[in-house]
Amino acid sequence: MVIVMESHATETDLQVVVEHVEALGLKAHPIFGVERIVVGVIGDERLIQKDQLSLIPHVENVIPILKPYKLTSREFKQDDTIIDVAGVKIGGKEMVVIAGPCSVENEEQLLETAYSVKNAGAKLLRGGAYKPRTSPYVFQGLGEEGLKLLMKAKDETGLGIVTEVMETADVELVAEYADLLQVGARNMQNTRLLRSLGKVKKPILLKRNFSATLNEFLMSAEYILSGGNDQVILCERGIRTFVEYTRNTLDLNVVPAVKQLSHLPIIVDPSHGTGRHDFVLPLSRAAIAAGADGLIIEVHPHPAQAFSDGEQSLTFEAFHQLMKEVNVIVQAMGRNC
Ligand code: PEP
Ligand code: MN
């Protein structure tokens, strides 16, 4: 349910509503809009009596949210959510590019990449310290050592850090280093992890699982929002289809679909979405044209020697070229980057 307050309602009136809702054993999520305050009411729907809520003083209207996801839905919040990641705003007019290696390998590799992507116009640095690999026999990431290198790269370049957290036990540690905590595709429905990220005071990048429906994707976001963290950025990274000439099939349909159904920003990962470095540029263009709020792209100084995902990583030169070429589409969309 959404409780719409009267336009002249005060903070004290709001407090009365919040107390009333909480007394029913439900959670209240106030949103301060330009014109009025609305309160999302979340919890066991059987406890919610629409008529009872509409009798609270200074309540103008009570509207049910029909979708299974509530706080994530456009019905709950009409305005686009803009998320501040270390001073970079995602979900507004700017189309933000996040770039960096798949895995943090060593100091030289990371710093060299960080400086290069920054010069090309990337606004945030990505790099995995904890890697969810298909084989247990290959590089699994540097762990905390990798987080320290990311922090060093941030100190030197000023770029905010995006890195994956794989386990609930690591959330606190990763949150000390990261500006944006990534939930990988394989963990999209790890509900324990999602719940613990609901308590974190930093933004979350939630990647879509390769077999998740749009509804499942948005329900996963709902776990984080309902836990108390409303800073969630969604990421489309490709799904499994019968197609075998690319690693995944980038489902760009999901971009306008998310824009209709949710107020959260959505970015696109053409690196994992295609698995091919030569397809990253065309699919980046397509993602921006479809309305994506940003891109996350893998870049490596020597892709052929990368510890992970070399075949889809761009060289510095290719990334610089990409940034120049996508700018044309960004401008055409009335945005800037
Ligand atoms: C990654 O970003 O390197 C990664 C492992 O992504 P995904 O979880 O989408 O496979
Ligand atoms: Mn990768």
Image: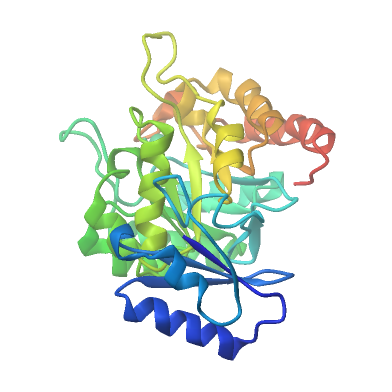
Residue at x 55% of width, y 42% of height: 261
Residue at x 23% of width, y 60% of height: 168
Q: Is residue 75 left or right of residue 132?
A: right
**Of residues 31 and 308, the one drawn nearer to the viewer in this rendering:** 31
Q: Quadrant of residue 284?
A: top right
Q: Which residue lies furthest to the left in this view?
A: 136
Q: From this viewpoint, is residue 133 visible?
A: yes
Q: Residue furthest bottom?
A: 12
Q: From this viewpoint, is residue 106 visible?
A: no
Residue 107: x, y in percent?
43, 54
Q: How many labels does the image show?
A: 0
286 lies above or below 331: above
**Of residues 266 and 227, the one drawn nearer to the viewer in this rendering:** 227
Q: Is residue 131 left or right of residue 99?
A: left
301 lies above or below 277: below
Q: In which quarter of the image is residue 33?
A: bottom right
**Of residues 237 and 315, the one drawn nearer to the viewer in this rendering:** 237
104 lies above or below 176: above
Q: Is residue 164 left or right of residue 53?
A: left
Residue 291: x, y in percent?
67, 36
Residue 176: x, y in percent?
38, 71
